[in-house]
């Protein structure tokens, strides 16, 4: 490694910092915005069960696999496969990852923009005087308009690019460590209020009592796609972060704690939102606006609601930011390293392109709402292609690489930190990455495609 490279590679300050950054990538809009609405569209409890099974049996092993590859190769996804194998085929993981990152950041910017608008509404104390109906109307009017949603999207993308240009996100992890626990506390406070709402128990029942008659092919594919999306898996984000892990980082424990924290935050968000859905007569399946239409009603009720609403949307924005920088980083690393363009130029160029496609996603709630393919808007299509196709396929290839291609001694060395940690679970892990994860992903996939074709 050259000097320049090694100084660049050392720029993550602490061991905890880089792990916080990985958790910061995982925890984002996926947990608080997407999980409740996807669960709501897929029958609640039954979605939750499938999703949890996928997190444990597929998400955690694929995350461990990304960690093994990243820390071993100490490179981003392209360099990593180049170093660990002579076969050019594996490059496909990186290419699909770049494409997924492009699509995800396009629609991520839309929702992050909504978050900024809601932060401003909170500051103006706009929820306080409004009824549940008025809050719904407010969302409908805002999300279907043109100027404001696009404007806030531009702001968010600008901030994301600004941070990525600064190189490895120094300092960001410092804030993540303080701000994410704060977000956690606020959500718990919302939970307590939500549960005590009249009708709140119906919401909890919806989320926690699975009705297996609602099980559909779509539920499987959405749950799988969301497991990958929420854990930032399948496109090399965590591989890149792991390339900065230290020798003594426990890869297994880190995977479990990142996946565990991520899941707990999603559950806590669900516990706040579904009681409110039922108490204020909203539809669980109302789609991407769900969080924005329900939570303002809770803020109205709680002591200190004004301050908490501001803090909540602010922190949600920060959570979105720590995820969006990790997504943009994938595209920038590719363009700057593979195409030999300076980081700054690469960041500006890719941000402009992503923002342009992103604006299409934003407008697909308003003027472009009629532009549909198979009933899906541009926003939906970007999300489905990235989350339900590209990420699971990437994850399948990553687990096949670990299960069938990478030398076993490398896996053992990485998981045991060169023999220091006990790894009695290695057989279970190998079974999951060799057989269960790839086969399960394959079947969910074929099943989903089949349903799509015959419908
Ligand atoms: N995991 C992030 C979230 O839940 C989104 C994300 C997806 C980030 C893929 C990186 C890669 O919001």
Image (cartoon, rainbow, N blue to C red):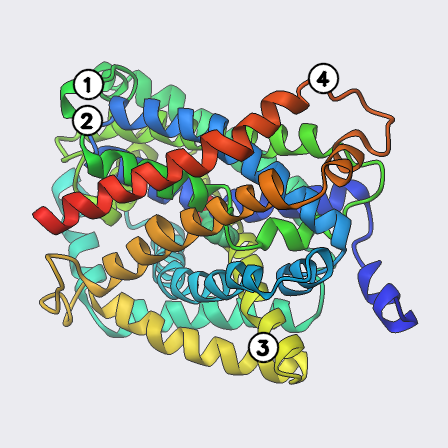
Q: Secondary structure at mark 3?
A: helix
Q: Which residue is mark 3?
A: 335
How far apart marks 2 and 4 lie (CA) works out to: 35 Å
Q: Which residue is mark 4?
A: 424
Which type of secondary structure does the marked residue at label 4 adopt? Answer: loop
Give how far across and how far down residue 74 sits, in percent.
76, 55
Mark 1–mark 3 distance (CA, rounded to whole Å): 45 Å
The answer to whether residue 289 of the structure is visible from this angle is yes
Give the Cα separation between the discs numbered 4 and 1.
35 Å
Label of residue 212 in the image: 1
Q: Is residue 310 visible?
A: no
Alpha carbons under labels 2 and 3: distance apart: 41 Å
Q: Label 4 vs label 3: CA separation?
A: 41 Å
Seen in the image, is 433 located left or right of residue 73?
left
Residue contact at pointers 1 and 3, CB within 8 angstroms? no
Residue 33 as seen in the image, left or right of residue 410: left
Q: Quadrant of the N terminus?
A: bottom right
Image quadrant where residue 8 sits: bottom right
Label drawn at residue 215 = 2
Residue 128 in percent (x, y) is at 28, 42
- Depth check, front residue: 32 or 195: 32
Q: Nearer the viewer, mark 4 or mark 1?
A: 4
* Residue at disc 1, secondary structure: helix
Give the mark count. 4
Give the vertical position of 193 relative to 92 (above or below): above
Q: Is residue 262 above or below residue 244?
A: above
Mark 1 in CB contact with mark 2 (< 8 angstroms) = yes
Q: Residue 385 appears at what percent x and percent y?
A: 31, 57
Figure check: 126 above or below 206: below
């Amino acid at each position: 490694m050259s000097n320049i490279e090694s100084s660049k590679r050392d720029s993550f300050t602490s061991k905890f910092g880089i792990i916080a950054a990985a958790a910061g990538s995982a925890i984002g809009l996926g947990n608080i915005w997407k999980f409740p609405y996807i669960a709501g569209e897929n029958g609640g409890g039954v979605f939750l069960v499938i999703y949890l099974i996928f997190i444990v049996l597929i998400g955690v092993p694929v995350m461990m696999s990304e960690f093994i590859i990243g820390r071993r190769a100490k490179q981003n996804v392209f360099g990593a496969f180049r170093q660990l194998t002579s076969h050019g085929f594996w490059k496909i993981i990186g290419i699909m990852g770049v494409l997924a990152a492009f699509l995800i950041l396009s629609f991520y910017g839309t929702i992050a923009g909504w978050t900024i608008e809601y932060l401003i509404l909170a500051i103006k104390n706009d929820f306080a005087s409004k009824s549940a109906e008025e809050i719904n109307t407010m969302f409908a009017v805002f999300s279907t308009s043109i100027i404001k949603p696009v404007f806030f999207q531009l702001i968010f993308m600008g901030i994301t690019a600004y941070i990525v240009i600064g190189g490895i996100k120094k300092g960001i992890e410092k804030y993540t460590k303080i701000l994410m626990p704060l977000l956690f506390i606020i959500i718990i406070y919302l939970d307590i209020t939500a549960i005590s709402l009249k009708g709140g128990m119906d919401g909890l029942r919806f989320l926690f009592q699975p009705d297996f008659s609602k099980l559909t092919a779509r539920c499987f594919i959405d749950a799988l796609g969301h497991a990958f999306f929420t854990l930032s898996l399948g496109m090399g984000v965590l591989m890149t972060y792991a390339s900065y892990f230290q020798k003594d980082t426990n890869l297994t424990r880190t995977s479990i704690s990142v996946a565990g924290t991520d899941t707990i935050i999603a559950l806590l968000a669900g516990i706040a939102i579904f009681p409110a859905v039922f108490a204020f007569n909203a539809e669980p399946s109302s789609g991407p606006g769900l969080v924005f239409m329900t939570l303002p009603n809770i803020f109205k009720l709680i002591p200190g609601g004004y301050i908490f609403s501001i803090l909540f949307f602010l922190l949600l924005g920060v959570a979105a930011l720590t995820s969006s920088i990790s997504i943009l980083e994938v595209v920038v690393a590719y363009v700057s390293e593979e195409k030999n363009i300076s980081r700054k130029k690469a960041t500006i160029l890719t941000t402009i392109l992503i923002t342009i496609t992103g604006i299409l996603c934003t407008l697909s709630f308003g003027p472009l709402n009629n532009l549909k393919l198979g009933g899906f808007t541009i926003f939906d299509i970007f999300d489905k292609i990235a989350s339900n196709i590209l990420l699971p396929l990437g994850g399948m290839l990553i687990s096949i690489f670990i299960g069938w291609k990478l030398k076993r001694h490398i896996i053992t060395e990485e998981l045991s930190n060169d023999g220091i940690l006990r790894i009695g679970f290695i057989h279970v892990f190998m079974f999951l990455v060799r057989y269960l994860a790839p086969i399960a992903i394959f079947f969910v996939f074929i099943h989903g495609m089949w349903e799509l074709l015959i419908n």
